[in-house]
Image (cartoon, rainbow, N blue to C red):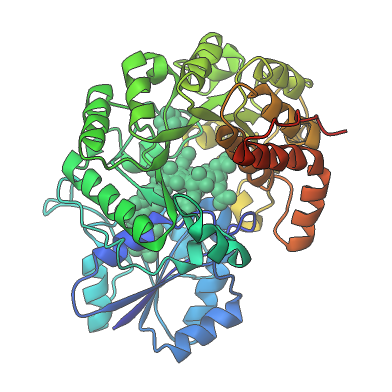
Amino acid sequence: MRILLYNPDNGVTRNFMPHLWMFLLQALTPAGHEVVLIDGNAQPMDEAGLAQYVREQNIGLVGIGAMTRMIAKAYRMADAVRAVGVPVVMGGPHVTEEFEEALGRDGGVRHADAVALGEADETWPKIVEDAARGTLKEVYSPVDDFGQERKPSLKDYPAIPWDKINLGQFNLVPKMFKNTLQKIGEGWGTFRIIPMESGRGCPYGCEFCTVTGFFGDSIRFRTNESVVNELLLLKARAKSEGGQIAVFFIDDNFAINIKRTKSLLRDIIAANAQVHWVAQISANLLRDEELVDLIAASGGKWVFIGMESIDPANLADVNKGFNKPGEYAAVLQRLANRNVYAITSFIFGMDNDTTGVADRTLKEIRTWPPGLPIFGLLTPLPATPLYKRLEAAGRLTRPKHWQKFIPFEMAHTPLKMSISEAHAEVKRGWALSYSAEALAHAVTALKDKPLGYRINIFIARMCFRGIYFPQMGPVAWTKLILQNRRTIYGLVCEGFATWRKLPAPAVQPAA
Ligand code: B12
Ligand code: SF4
């Protein structure tokens, strides 16, 4: 049987990073079946295009995975596939919580023939065999012989054949620069960000987060050896292609067990398996100097920190009191001292937020080493404690917000500001952090750092800007480049000057 695994586009960014679930399920597919992957972020498709592909390619089963924000698109694509008579199985965090919606048991349209609840590592092979026999069931749950929920241990994690997988669609280097860049120094003909997990689960139970409910509070890890081998495979591939690969450790809290994280990082260093990597780590775990040393030595370049708010009352409200705003500056400085930078994530529209929250937050951020701040709105995702609290209090303004997804739009009213005020705060956060002035400031603030770090921060900021301000086409990018021309000119001149060993002109902040 030919199986298609499809991930809908997120409607915001393009081919940023492949989704791990597709590669993982492909690796877990029983022998004798062929699996093709389409990520809508890299290969945009509409309903008719997908239905045509499925017919022409003789696909016998389509698996669709999606987060809540993409589920409306996922359902439309699933409907189109089912309309040409091919069964659809859906999985992932949204349908796990709302499987009755996917199956049309809530009185709405049925979108999926089957749903895979929770982690599908062990149910996927059964789904494939049932589909091949024409005996697909409606619901697949990860349970043992006694009907008890069973979480995959990750001890016998499959080897994902990264050396053979076609990653052409995920190259972030524009085609026109590929050949030239391939020849430069360490080779930049290709640049890909690859998702890798070293463990699953987070016991912290932040109120807005689905992770503790979905993956459980039992933390499970792959063996160090399996992670190191995967890194070595990727590193070898990048070298053979004259390109670069960075890894995104998608673990929800990469240092949740500090002892184990240190042991993994030491093994990465010992095996010379370092590639540049990004990971999500909560601020409280970054107090450990030795951990931060090992992060830097093992290739860590960016750490994503869910700071959420600078207001302890807000943090307590969402069960994230373990975040201590008073130590944010020290944590970021500790990272910056090792040339590791932070993606700092903030949520506005929390119950203790009042107007001016963006300015108050930005004032704090400006005292920290430059990083990549991102701003979102408190969103009640299905089945989270937050959703249940707001629903019980009658505060949900759009209880099924995902059925008509609108980016950066609240689905409940905060207590101390209106919805439109919360929207304005998020807009202000993005506008002031990603203006040409802010980008120039980030570059000059790092004047003591090597040129490479400044270019890295600058490019990352240009890309991150696109999370809020749509910049998908060449016109939008040209406009952005023009707005930032002074900073770009300064960096280019400095690059040439360094190259020719001439004195460099100072980088002027943009007007
Ligand atoms: C990596 C990641 C991202 C990346 C995504 C890029 C990428 N290409 O992967 C980035 C950093 C960009 C990101 C951003 C966001 N993310 Co995110 N992210 C994750 C994270 C940490 C890992 C995803 C992952 O690969 N997991 C490992 C794989 C193996 O697990 P999985 O995807 O769940 O797949 C398993 C099962 O679900 C199932 N399965 C999944 N799909 C399918 C399909 C089929 C057919 C079948 C059979 C089974 C199946 O099988 C898999 C194996 O068991 C998860 C948390 C987590 N630990 O999963 C959050 C998570 C997915 N993100 C989440 C959210 C909310 C967001 C944001 C909206 C945050 C924000 N406020 O801005 C943005 C939106 C991004 C966008 N524009 O679309 C939520 C989604 C909850 C929900 N109900 O939708 C999660 C669960 C975290 C959370 N806080 O609750 N994210
Ligand atoms: S620390 Fe992160 S992953 Fe863990 S529950 Fe909180 S938000 Fe979710």
The correct choice, above or below, for 467 with respect to 36 in the image is above
User: For the view shown, which residue lies furthest in the top direction?
Assistant: 326
Q: Residue furthest left?
A: 145
Q: Quadrant of the N terminus?
A: bottom left
Q: Nearer the viewer, residue 416 or 488?
A: 488
Q: Residue furthest right?
A: 511
| Residue in the image at 46% along x and 84% along y | 54
Q: Could you tell me residue 89's position as x and y percent?
A: 38, 69
Is residue 162 toward the left or the right of residue 504 in the image? left
- State the count of labels: 0
Q: Residue 497 in the image: state x and y as whole percent.
A: 67, 37
Q: Nearer the viewer, residue 479 or 243?
A: 243
Compared across the picture, whether 91 is left or right of 182 comes to left
Q: Is residue 24 left or right of residue 48?
A: left
Quadrant of the image containing the C terminus:
top right
Of residues 150 and 106, the one drawn nearer to the viewer in this rendering: 150
Image quarter for ligand 2: top left
Q: Is residue 398 visible?
A: no
Q: Is residue 13 above or below residue 79?
A: above
Relative image position of residue 422 (x, y in whole percent):
75, 31
Q: Position of residue 402 (x, y in %)?
A: 60, 53
**Residue 99 drawn above or below residue 296:** below
For image coordinates 39% across by 28% down, the residue present is 296
The vertical placement of 137 against 142, above or below, is below
Q: Nearer the viewer, residue 386 or 315?
A: 315
